[in-house]
Image: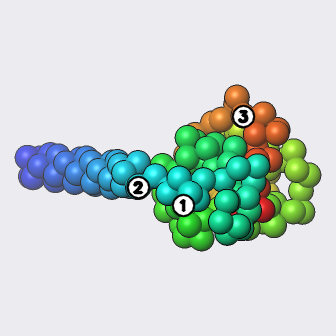
Amino acid sequence: MENILQNMKLQHVKNLLYSLLALLIIICGVAIYQLLQPAPDSSQVAWCGVTESGQGNIDIIGKELFTANCASCHAKSMMDNLTGPALRGVTKRWAAYPEADLMEFIRHSQKMIRQKHPQALKVWKKFQPVIMNDFPRLTDDEIRHLLAYIEGK
């Protein structure tokens, strides 16, 4: 009987490890997929916030920050949940709180969760156990560019 229980525990641990490995493979696959996306046509490269073809506004600094810091977990469409939540509308979801709260969440999400910030807890409840990376070096201005890109402004 003891051997059966031991075998069951071992099988449970193996299943857990296989699940974690599968999750890691998915995350890596998404990151690689996003890295392999073709570069934009040079005639469409944005300058000073507007593409040459006039196809809407784009915050180049924000796009670069998104690509470097966010794209591995958040969908490029900004409309779909991926490892992390869809980002379009994030400023509206945080509108009831000071701008500094959203900036602090971007820099130190787990700190905000530990402090029981209501909006941080709401995000955590939906996406746990996935922990967002900390971005302590992002300046307020960089975060504003990032948010402008996310919101399509």
Q: List the residue tagged with mark 3.
A: 138
Q: Which marked residue is nearer to the observer: mark 3 or mark 2?
A: 2
For disc 1, the neighbor class at 10 Å (few under 14, some 14 to 19, many from 20) is some
Q: Earlier in the sequence, mark 1 or mark 3?
A: 1
The front one of 16 and 111 is 111
Residue at 50% from the left image edge and 56% from the top image edge: 40
- Image vertical order of residue 4 relative to residue 103, above or below: below
Q: Where in the figure is residue 98, as x and y percent of width and height?
A: 91, 52
- Image vertical order of residue 141 relative to residue 152, above or below: above
Residue at 53% from the left image edge and 53% from the top image edge: 42
Q: Kindly check if marks 2 and 1 are in contact, taking CB atoms under 8 A apart as contact.
A: yes
Left or right of residue 43: residue 12: left
Q: Where in the figure is residue 96, as x and y percent of width and height?
A: 90, 63
Marks 2 and 1, how far apart in space? 11 Å
Left or right of residue 97: residue 72: left
Left or right of residue 4: residue 69: right
Q: Where in the figure is residue 62, as x and y percent of width and height?
A: 69, 48
Residue at 29% from the left image edge and 50% from the top image edge: 25
Q: Kindly check if marks 1 and 3 are in contact, taking CB atoms under 8 A apart as contact.
A: no
Q: List the residue tagged with mark 2.
A: 37
- Residue 134: tell me if it is visible: yes
Quadrant position of the C terminus in the picture:
bottom right
**Disc 3 residue type (three-letter):** Leu
**Disc 2 residue type (three-letter):** Gln
Marks 1 and 3, how far apart in space? 20 Å
Q: Earlier in the sequence, mark 3 or mark 2?
A: 2
Q: List the residue tagged with mark 1.
A: 76
Res 50 quadrant in image = bottom right
